[in-house]
Amino acid sequence: MHEQTAAAEAATGLDSVLASAHIAPEVTRLRPDYRVMLLAVAGIEPAPSDRVSEELLVAAEAQAAHVLAQQPATELPHIAAWREAYRAFGAKPQRTRNSLEALMRRAAAGLPRVNRLTDVYNAISVLHQVPLGGEDLARYQGAPRLIRATGEEAFDTTAAGEAVVEHPAPGEVIWGDDAGVTCRRWNWRQCSRTALTDDTTTAVFILDALAPMSDDALTDAADALADALTGLGPDVRVRRRLIGAS
């Protein structure tokens, strides 16, 4: 009974975080076709990379090689859409690449092996051609929100091996919480404060979609991620929420 109560409380907490998530109107005005699928997850058992995560990464590397043999990364439909979105708020996509493009460019030399949680979501990102970020939910203060920056928000990162605080450019699209920026330039670089670690047990995953990616394709990516995450412990609980114009 105690275990059932704990599971119910955890699920309620995940639902509460998702219900409070917010996309600012100025972001949807910038890209009315934008949608996001949020997955909140509890009960993850931390572990190093394993056979299952390795199989997913190998499959992702093979698919990336096949796709990139047909056309360069910059011409892949979803990557091209994100490069256009970056230009719309003043970023230079040739200098700051969205997370999907960055992974696709790394795939030929081998995707990173970090731990099984990070490996799983990187593989799903490539396999389903969707920018996908993962954050440690225990380190969040408040709920995720997507806004255009004032330029005053704090972004915790590292430079030359040292912890530093930077600030986004005014008008930049950022994910954040009550404490500051959690990811700059929509899906370019995550902050240090909420980064997944080898000890993460609760997380929120952000799957970003623009046209031509359909809602069905976005849902398929979320299903694949949820299926993979449920294998990361016997008591994993996953909740999701789709936010967007459609």
Image: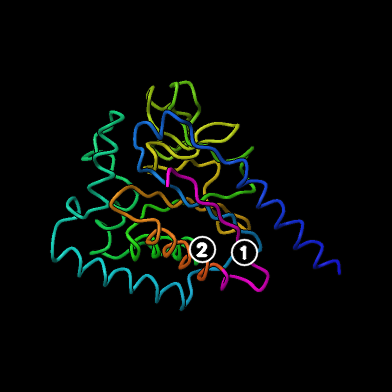
Among the 4 quarters of the image, the one containing residue 82: top left
Image quarter in which the N terminus is found = bottom right
- Identify the residue at horizontal 36%, vertical 38% (top origin): 32
Q: Position of residue 84 (x, y in %)?
A: 24, 39
> In the picture, residue 54 is in which quadrant?
bottom left
User: Is residue 239 on the magenta stretch?
Assistant: yes
| Rendered location of residue 235, percent (x, y) | 68, 69
Disc 2 marks which residue?
117
Assign a secondary structure to mark 2: helix
Vertical arrangement, residue 242 with respect to residue 189, above or below: below
User: On the picture, is 218 further left or further right than 202?
Assistant: left
Residue extent of the magenta highlight: 230-246
* Picture disc at residue 44: 1
Give the Cα separation between the discs numbered 2 and 1: 8 Å
Q: Position of residue 71 (x, y in %)?
A: 13, 60
Seen at 33% across and 73% down, the residue is 58
Judged from the image, the secondary structure of the residue bearing numbered disc 1 is: loop
**Callout 2–callout 1 Cβ contact below 8 Å:** yes
In the image as oriented, which residue stretches furthest toward the front? Answer: 246
Q: Badge 2 local density, few (<14 within 10 Å), some, or many (20+)?
A: many
Image check: 28 left or right of 104? right
- Tag count: 2
Front residue of this view, candidates 57 and 11: 11
